[in-house]
Image (cartoon, helix red, strand yellow):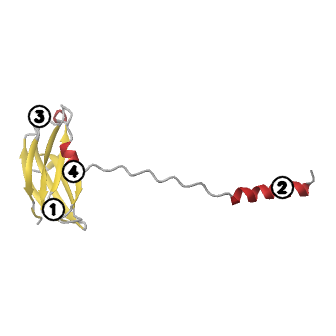
Amino acid sequence: MSPHRLALLSLALLLAACSSQPEKASPAPAKPKRPSSEQAIAAPLPGHLRQLSGSLLGIPADAEAEIALLQVDSKGRPLKSYASQRLLGQGGALPFALSFDPQSLPGDGRFELRARVSQSGRLILRLPPQSLNPTQSRDFGPLQLVRAP
């Protein structure tokens, strides 16, 4: 076969390969749905875990709320966080559920549930500290936040 014919055949094969129809793109896999707070609250817990649940009232839409189980010192200063959850405000009550292992907590510690709400990077609301016994699950019910200083 002459080099001229070989070049022509190669060119024809390249053109044929380029002219084929593209394969249909497979649809992107569906994003896994993030469980809502209601689903997290309703989910059964393993026997060794405990849960703090309730709802935060008065959270503006698009505000970011953070709620946490904290160990505090004798003056109420946070020492360590054992469970926390970040939630995005919807303009109404915002359910929460914090799961934790009471075995991981020091037996002689003081514990509080605290929450803060920020909007556009500015602290706007806070939950007054709620003292608790972390050996038991507890439903706090609706919790009213107060304006941050």
Name the residue that disc number 2 marks.
9
User: In this image, 72 relative to 21: left or right?
Assistant: left
| Disc number lying in front (3 or 1) | 1
Whether residues under marks 4 and 1 lie with C-beta atoms below 8 angstroms apart, the answer is: no
- Element under disc 1: loop
Amino acid type at mark 3: Gly
- How far, Cα to Cα, is label 2 from label 1? 70 Å
Nearer the N terminus, badge 4 or badge 1?
Answer: 4
Pick the front one: 53 or 75: 53
Residue 77: horizontal and vertical position, in percent?
A: 12, 51
Residue 122: horizontal and vertical position, in percent?
A: 21, 67
Name the residue that disc number 4 marks.
37
Nearer the N terminus, badge 3 or badge 1?
Answer: 1
Amino acid type at mark 1: Gly
- How far, Cα to Cα, is label 4 from label 1? 13 Å
Name the residue that disc number 3 marks.
107
Nearer the N terminus, badge 4 or badge 3?
Answer: 4
Pick the front one: 25 or 124: 25
Amino acid type at mark 4: Ser
**Residue 37 visible in rendering:** yes
- How far, Cα to Cα, is label 2 from label 3? 82 Å
Name the residue rendered at 92%, 50% in the picture: 1
Pick the front one: 132 or 40: 40
Name the residue that disc number 1 marks.
92
Name the residue rendered at 25%, 66% in the picture: 121
Nearer the N terminus, badge 2 or badge 1?
Answer: 2
